[in-house]
Amino acid sequence: MLCFVNNFQKLIKKIHLLPKCFESFGLIHGDFCYGNYSVKADGTITVFDFDESQYGWFVQDISVNLFYGIAVPSEDENAISFTQRYLTYFLEGYSEENSIEYKLLLEQLGIFLDLRQAVLYSSLHRNGDIKNLDRWSKTFLERSEKNMLLEGPFIDIEKLKLWIFGRKVNINYTRAVIEHMGTRVE
């Protein structure tokens, strides 16, 4: 348990060092995960359950949503490939409404994934009957304990860096080609 407390304290120190600027910090949902939105057949997304709304970093909402897809990786897809697939579509949609600096995303994503891991880990211990958890929760606790014991990240962000920066270049290149052909891309 001491390693958990030490990891949590280090994480809080990292968060306190993050910049609070207009581009990266503002009003967020705080718990933007699969149980707190619905998607209609026409693709309309309705977000609800705003009891954890707060001022925070925009990447927090992205990381919470991503977290539950990789907290317990499936047998047919590892966490890195799921994250790549998830970010491909999420960032495509996100960038239609908001801009995001990829460097900031990479700097903050790992921190907030680690934070969500710590929050869920502590809430399972606080609220759950640890001996009678479902399979997903047991697997999550085992993975989290290993991460915290080894002081490792929830996900290896370094493996995502080249992929994300490569996507950014490809997106910008595609936009430049389309604009060169006479079509403006916003």
Image: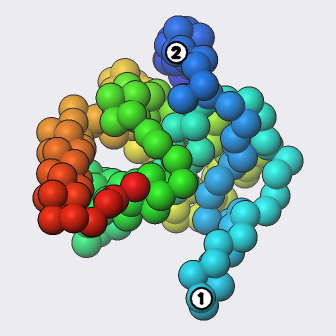
Query: Is 64 placed left or right of 145 in the picture?
Result: right
Tell me if mark 2 has few (under 14), some (14-19) or many (20+) residues whose alpha carbon lies within 10 angstroms of its own.
Answer: some
Q: Are marks 1 and 2 in contact (CB under 8 Å)?
A: no
Q: Which residue is mark 2?
A: 18
**Residue 166, percent from left and from top:** 15, 45
Which label is found at residue 70? Answer: none
Which label is found at residue 42? Answer: 1
**Residue 158, percent from left and from top:** 21, 32
Q: Nearer the viewer, residue 43 or 180?
A: 180
Q: The disc labelled 2 sits on which kind of residue? A: Leu
Q: As displayed, is residue 45 above or below residue 180?
A: below
The answer to whether residue 11 shows anywhere in this view is yes
Give the residue furthest to the bottom: 41
Q: Earlier in the sequence, mark 1 or mark 2?
A: 2
Q: Nearer the viewer, residue 43 or 153?
A: 43
Tell me if mark 1 has few (under 14), some (14-19) or many (20+) residues whose alpha carbon lies within 10 angstroms of its own.
Answer: few
The answer to whether residue 163 shows anywhere in this view is no
**Residue 112, percent from left and from top:** 51, 33
Q: Nearer the viewer, residue 63 or 115?
A: 63
Query: Is 82 placed left or right of 5 in the picture?
Result: left
